[in-house]
Structures are given as C-alpha cells and as structure tokens.
Image (tube, helix red, strand yellow):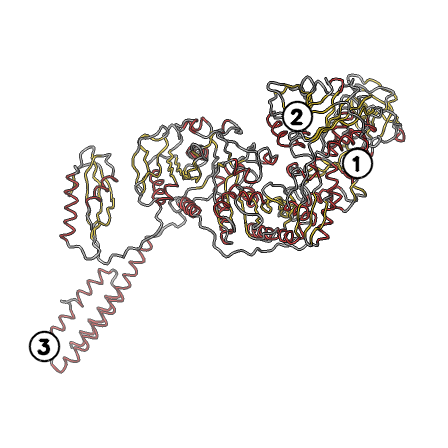
Amino acid sequence: MKFSYNWIRELVRDLDVEPRELMRLITIKTAECEGVELTGAHFERVVAARVLSVEPIADSHNVKAVVDAGGLGRRTVVCGAPNCRAGIVTAYVPSGTALEGRVIEKRVVSGVESDGMLASAAELGINRDQEGILELDGVEPGARLPRLAADSIIEVDNKSLTHRPDLWGHHGMAREVAAITGKQLRDPVNTELVPAASPVYGVDIRDLQLCPRYSALVVANVKVGPSPLWFQQRLQAVGLNPINNIVDITNFVMAELAQPMHAFDADKLRGDTIIVRGAEEGERMLALNGEWYELTPSALVIADREGPIALAGVIGGWDSAISDTTTRIVFESANFHAASIRRTSSRLKLRTDASMRFEKAQDPVNTLRGLARAVALLELVAPDARIAGGLSDMAAPPRTTAPIELPMDWLVRKLGRPIAPGEVRRILEALEFGVSEPAQGVFSVRVPSWRATKDISIKDDLVEEIGRMEGYATIPPTPPLVPAVPASDNPRLRFFRSLRRMCAAQGFDEVYNYSFLSEEDVRRFGLAPEDHIRVTNPISVEQGLLRRTLIPGLWKNIQENGKHFASFRLFEVGFEIHKRAGSLPEEAPHLAAAMYSRQGGTETLFEVKRLAECLMPGCELRPAQARQYEHPSRAAEVWWRGEAAGRMFEFHPNYVETGRAVVLDIDLAVVERLAPADVKYKAVRRYPESAFDLSVVAGQRALVGDIGRQIHSLGGPYLEQVEFLRQYEGAPLPEGVKSVSFRITVAAADHTLSNEEVTAVRDGIISGMRASGYDLRV
Amino acid sequence: MIEESLKELAASTRKRIDEAATAGALEAVRVEVLGRKGTLAQISKDMGRIAADERAKIGKLLNAAKSELESAMDARKAMFEEQALNARLDAEWVDLTLPAPGPRPGSLHPLTQIQQELEDLFLSMGVSVLYGPEVETEYNNFDALNIPPDHPARDMQDTFWLEGGHVLRTHTSPVQVRGMARFGPPLRMIAPGRVFRNEEVDPSHEHTFYQLEGMMVDRDVSIAHMLYFMKTLLAHIFGREVTVRLRPGYFPFVEPGFELDVQCLICGGPGCPVCKQSGWVELLPCGLVHPNVLRMGGIDPEQWGGFAFGLGLTRLVMMRYGIDDIRHLQGGDLRFLRQF
C-alpha cells in the first residue's frame, strides 16, 4: 500500500515530521514501511510553454518546435509527439531537470540542438497517457503547472496491514500519525452533504450477513472527462490509474477512506431497485476488465431487474460502466462480508483494490462517509453535476460491541513495566477509543467502529495499542521466574545426533534433499506415482509428489558429485512420507547413505557395510532379490535383532555409469525401537580361554555368514566367539569350492577348560558340520 | 710366574674385547677366555698344582681378572646391542608426510549444526525440544493458530495443499499446538524443523526451509520476559550482545505480535546494502500467545499466558556463513557442504 506524504499532511494538522522520519515512526509504532520514494520533484522546475512554431526535420518523424516558456524565454526543442503543433500550451521541462530517473540535458537530436523537452502526462507522472505531449488549458506560459508538486511516497508492507481495515486508506494512517506525533487529525468528510430526500433507487439486500450495508446515491448532469491534473497525479502517485473524473472519484475515496466505491451508468440500469443477492446457477457477467466470469451461488452479485451488474466487492460489470456519454450515475458505497469476498475473489483468481480491502473486514459505518466524500469531490472534478434524490440505504442493525474491560494491573503484568493510568487513557483517546473508569484501576474501553470489525475485540488487543504507542523500547528485558524443572527428554534428538555423528565419523558428508519428486523420478525407481501423496498445487510437475523413498534424491546427488569427485560418501537423514488412510501420512525416518567410487571393486560394498555395523552392531546382510535399479547379485536386506531394518545394494550399472555406487537405506524407526536401552554388566571372566581353528570346505557361493552361524549353533555352552579368518579357493581344492577358516574361542565362567573339554567342543562342531553336509579340512 | 701370565692374559683379552668388531667376534673371545672350557677355567682347574701359600693370592687375582673381563665384555655387548637397535630403528624410517589412509571425516550439514547448537542452548535453559510432522492437518497449521478458513492471513503463507486436504506445514507453529496438548501448562518448548512455502526458488527464496519455533507458557508472562529470552538467544547466536528493537508485526496466533529487528551486524546502524539502508535486519517474529490459541490448546488464558517466537534457521545459517545463494543448502553439492 502506497501512502502519499502530502495527502497525510493534509489530514494531520501542523505535521512537522520529515518523510523519512515519518516512515521510521510508522514502522516502529504501526506497520512495516518498505521505503520512501520522492516523486514529482521535477514539478519544481517544469513550466507551461506555448508552442510558437513547428518545423519538420528532414528524415525524421521529430519536429523542431520553438516555444515561449514565459520567464525562461524562447527555447528550441526537438519533439516527437504527434500533437505538437503551434498554438497549444504544453509542459516544458528545462535542461538539467531530472525526469523518470534521468537528467534532461541540452543535446543534438536529429541534427537540431534541443534545449529541454516537451513532456507527456505519463512522463510527468500525472497519469499513464503517453500518446502525446500534455495540452494545458488556462495556464500562462512560464507558470508552474497548477497544484502539481513533489511528494514522498511511503510504501507499507501489505502483510503488516492484514488486520487493519482502516489502514487501507490515508485517513486511517493519518489517524495513526496524529496519535504518534501528538497532532490533530482532520476529518475530510462532511456527512451533511448527503441530502435527505427520497431515494431514486430502492435497495434490496437478500442476505444482510453477506452484505451488511448498501448505500447509493444518484448524480445527474454529469460530464465525463479527465480529472484535474493534480487530482490525477495524486491517484497516480499511490498506484491508482486515472481513468475519468467519475471513476477517479471512486478511487480517491477508496484511497482516502479505505471504502471501495463503484459508479454505474444510471441509464444502463433496468428497473428501480438495486438487488444484492447470490448469483444464480449458470449466471455469467462481462466485467470491466473485458473478461467473462462464470458465477456460482456462493458469489454475491449486485443486480438490477435483468441480471448482474457487478460482482459484489470485486469488480463492476462492463455493460453498466461509465462511458464518455454517461450523464447520470449511481455511486455505490457498500459493505460486504470479508470471507465471502475473499472466497469469490480466490475462486475467480481476481484480486482487485476493492476485494483486497473488503476481505480485511471494512466498517459498515464508512459507506455513508464514502458517499459524502464523493459528493464533496464532485465539486472539484465535475462541478456541473447535481445530486438527484436522496440516499438509498439498507443496512443490518448496527453491531453493538460491548466495551472491553481493561484492568490496569493485568496490563502491567502483560507489558512487564509499570504505566500510569493517565498515559493509558491518553494513548487510547488519541486513537479515538472511548475510555471510562467504572472502578478504580479498571478502564472500560469502547472500540471505534473502524477497529471493531475484526481487529480489536479483547483486552489483549489493547495491550498492543498501548505498548506500541508508548514504545516497546521502554520495556526492560526481564528474566522470567520459572520452575526449576529439567527439560523433557527427547530420545529421537539423542538418537539422530549419535546417528549423524557416526555417519560423519565414517567419512560420510551430510546432504539435505527436497521432499518432492516427479513422476519420472518415482517410475525410475520402480514405484507407481499413484502410491504417492500428490501436491494439489505444485510449483511444477517435477515437484508434484511427496517422496516415499530417499533414494532418488541420493541418486541425483551421486550423479552430480560424480562429475567433481573420484570417490565420495554422503548421507541424508530424512522422512519418507507414506499414504495412510483416514489420517495424517506416516512419516518414516530413514537414513540413506551412499558411497561412490569411479573404480570398480568390492571395497565400496564393505565400507558401506561397516557403516551398517557401526549403527547396528551385529547386524546381518541377507542376500535379496534385486530390484530394477540394483546390481542383480549385490543386493541384500539388513537384519538386526531379528527384524528387517533396511537394505544395502550396489546400483545397477545402468543407473550409475561412471563408477560404482553402494547404498544403505535404513528404517530408523526400527533401529530406534531395537536399540538396547540399558547396559547390563557381565562379570569379567577370571579363567583363561582357549581357541582352535577350523576350515570348512563349501560351495563357492555358500555364505560365510551361514557357515559361521551353523558353527555357532553347534558350539555349546562354552562357545565364546566364532571369528572368520580367511577364505581360499584354488589348488589343491577342486574347482567350484572354497575353504573358509574360522577361529573358535571357548571358555567357561567357573574353571579353566581342560584339553578334553576343548576337544569335545571341537569334535561336536566337526561332526555336526559333517552331518550338515560340509566337508572339513582337519 | 703364573701371576705374570695371568696379567698378560687379562691385558691381551681386554684388548681383544675392545677390538672385537662384531657381536660374533666378541662371543668367540668370551667362549675362548671366559667359557666353561676357556682359558680362565683352565687356569682355575690348574690351581691345585699351585703351592698352597700362593693359591689364595692367585685365586684372588684370577677372580679379579674374571670379573673385570666380564664387565668389559658386558659393556661391549651392550654397545653392540644398542648399535643393532639403532640400525634397526634407522631402517624403520617412515615418511610421515604421506597422507593417512581411510576416509576423511564427514561433515554435518550447516543446518544440522546450527539446529544442534540452538537445541543445546535451549536445553541448558530447561526448554524441551519437540519435533512435529512435516505434513500437518489444516486445523493444526491454521485454525488452531487462530487462522480460520478465508482469513486473509492465509495469504501470508503460500501453502502447498495435498490431496486429502492436508498441508505441508507452512511454519513450525503447529508444534505449539502439539506441545500444549502433550504437556499442558507450564510449558517451555522449542520445535526446529523443515517447513514449506509455495514459492518459486531463486537465490533468496526457497520452497523448503528450516525454522525454529519457541513457546513459553506460564503465569504472568510479559513482553519484558520475551525480550529477555530473545536477547539471550541472540547474544548466544552471534557471540555478543546485540541491539534489538521491537515493533508491531501481525501474526494471528500472537497478540500483541512483533517483529524483532537486530541492529545490522554489518554496518552497525548507519545503513548498508545488507540492511537495505535501514540499519536494522528483521530476524524474529514473536509475540504474546493469543488467548484463542491457548484456549484451543486446552489452556485457560485467564490463568496462563505465554510468548512464542519463530526463528529462521535457514536465514541464520546464511547470515552466519555469508552464504549468498539459498539453493546451496538443498543442492547436495559436496564442494559446498564439505566447507562446514
């Protein structure tokens, strides 16, 4: 929202704060200002000039014009405007003037020295007309352009005005400024200007909830034409496009009072009643912007006897719009239910200056004020116009809001500093709250109508009013007194930390990937898009699904980093998001780790396996059926404490072409659940252990893990450990077999094992293994 | 006579010991002179033939010679052993400038690091750390935070909607709702986590970023308490006292609501490009918890009050390390990540 400093200064008596300081004050007391920009400084230099003569310039569409600039004398300028002709009075910009961010210098154009320039209204920042140079009426050469002056435009962040319907107009902001600076607010509205006569149109509001008030006034003898330049410049400076005097009035009122208005061509309306109703199924309307809108019953329309003439609170209709030939108009000044306007405007994807204001919950009292102000403005921009009849007005019974009880001791406890009751009263009254003190130490605060629609309803809201105006800088930071209780434990915090520390210690770098995947991403990994949760409004189709595996993200990391590194390790801790009927999705914490190497070999597999063993001591890998993206003979499930906890695999070479990449994907919920909670001490053994080695001959693809487990199961109560030593293939072993050596350690808790006992264990294992079909080299 | 030859033997053996070039040569001398069948043993065997009156004297001489030679022998032997050890150690020379084998230590993501740092700070102040889900109900993300449907504040956060009506949480504030339900008052909690906004990505905008929510509910919580907490937090983050200012800010779940600005750490106040010439950098939205939010969290606002704040972890990481492109954080580029 743009605020004109000049406009505010008209509304605050004796305002003596410079624009930049005003911006700072507004920022710390009211709403966030994004900047201040000086506009129209050139009006201090621009003068009216009469074109004396115009000569064509050979081979150029420009002309050479000699102008009489009054006190500045005669100047020669090169001008390209089609309407540059002798006799007209236009705007002359002397050399050395800054205009639209550049300085106009004396220079040669089309072979002619041009001293200054003749300017269009758009170049001067009056409106958007750039068809030709400005043509002035009744201004003497050499005179300044009447009432056009430099102005500072303060830009306020719209987000910080979300809760303040009153600040969508200059008068509301001026009230803040007056309260901040201790000056007096001037009200530009005189409601007595609205005549008390019988109205021309009846008003029929079908739902007073959706339209709490509709006011209208008919104006006859209207001559539609441009507004005075200063009026146009004022609208232009705050970002509103000047159109014609009537439309400009409605915009001026909106910019000043935050009350959106509309003007209909009265001769285009059918019937004698303005109806406010829900749209009928299948109804459509051509709007002012030239677009057709298909309406549904949830949309509120303004209609005449025949059909919709405006989309309530959003945009007017094309057919009843003001045109050059309009002579009779209806000014509409209405109030609509905020959420309803917002719903319609979002559904039609049509946000207008009006809808933006209505959705903040405007004050129904303001409709009449808007009309009164419009009447006053007619004097300035359409002096021949005459009011026809009286006010058409229909309204819901005024909302009565009970005063807010504000206990002083409560206020002090919220602020955290003492404040004098007199000061509280002064602040609230400066903001036009009604204050009384029914009991010692308790104020009864009546909220003005423009703050009562949504903004202020409870005493907490008043804390803000008092705090900000008093100045938050006056509140001393104070340590709170709190119970000395420890923070509640968060086991996941500790688990994730140790996990990440372990991964980093094993050389893995942490990455964060997005939660979004594309359909192509998931299909690449053999998943069906329909099994994923879909984003209904994604930024792009590439980000339309929520990930239910971290692997595609990791795979992209591998592709990208493979361009820069011969080998690397990386990991991500993140959430898989799985559909779950009837409730929030399941968010499964996963660790995905990968190691890449441009060289082949199996070391990579075992480096990644070590990470698994670090996280899950004693975990086992069980060969698994490979998926489409996995190396067909290098894929395994990771089992820990009797449960499948994840998967380890090497990427299929079709997926990683420049090297080898191994992935570990672990379901952290399983690991978290299975991680041992308590450590139980076991007595350190006092008797020595014994060890012997055994070599088992087995088929080439027999699993060492299986053989070891088999030995383990045969070991009996004295078995301490079965340790893999080495495996061997080749002579003298026959083709297709290997020999696997283990060291078996045995011991007893209560005595030293005798040779006979050790031999008995050994013999038991050997015969057991043989019975299971293994050959032993003993 | 025998005395003479004993002295001579001692002297010549002494010379041979000193001149022995190797441990082997020394051993040969030992065997020859001091061995069981060596010269000295022979002499002592022959002692019987010596006149009794001389025997004691010769015996003494013999023992003296033997012990002298033995200690010379030991010394020489020790010298050889030391030499041998030195030679072996010398041969064990290693080039210690060679790189260590095995993986270099991995790095933790800068967001992880800053999150852990802040978690530790708050834990040290007795504040619990809670985690909430990334997919939230519309109710928790909006309604329970005093943002009803069709409230214009819903526009302040461009929302990703999911099929089924849930949302990707637009802020960590829904964890307030979960925290109140789980613990009730009094309550001190933070909730760091990933949040989502439907925004095009460019060097300073991301659709995925990290926040840290904080909330305290107790009897008589004031703006002054909130300010103290915020200043403590910021002093820790920046490693020094920072100048702050509080100004009005609108967030439906707090009343009053504030923006807390930090005096620009780059220019210190006069204005520079980082603070857009204002001297202040907007850092911490915060406020006193709106009574509606307390009520929806099952807490009686007449009995309890609170403050809440939201800290942008992504923003903080970028400020701390001077990162100029937000996209690095989720880009997975190890050339970036290994710097932390």
Mark 2 secondary-structure assignment: loop
Query: Can marks 3 and 2 be said to lie on one chain?
Result: no
Q: Residue at x 22, y 44 (%)?
A: A712
Q: In this view, does A254 lie to the left or right of B77?
A: right
- On the image, the x and y values in percent for residue A589 come to 42, 39
Above or below B49: residue A256: above
Residue A188 numbered tag: 1
Looking at the rendering, which quadrant does residue A185 occupy? top right
Give the percent coordinates (x, y) of residue A55.
Answer: 84, 18
Report, in whole angstroms, how far the alpha carbon at label 3 lies from the one at label 2. 152 Å
Tell me the distance, in whole angstroms, between the alpha carbons under discs 3 and 1.
149 Å
- Classify A294 as above or below B66: above
Total label count? 3
Q: Residue A206 carries which label?
A: 2
- Residue at screen point 57% across, 49% down: B306
Q: Position of residue A719 (x, y in %)?
A: 21, 49
* Labels 1, 2: one chain: yes
Q: Mark 2 — on which chain does it sit?
A: A
Question: Which chain is indicated by disc 1?
Answer: A
Quadrant that contains the N terminus of chain A: top right
If the image is split into quadrants, where does the C terminus of chain A sit?
Answer: top left
What's the distance in space between the residues labelled 1 and 2, CA to CA?
A: 33 Å
Three-letter amino acid code at disc 3? Answer: Arg
> Residue tagged by mark 3?
B49
Toward the viewer: B234 or A305? A305
Q: Which of marks 1 and 2 is nearer the N terminus?
A: 1
Q: Are marks 1 and 2 in contact (CB under 8 Å)?
A: no
- Percent across and percent down for residue A709 are 23, 42
A44, A738: nearer the viewer: A44
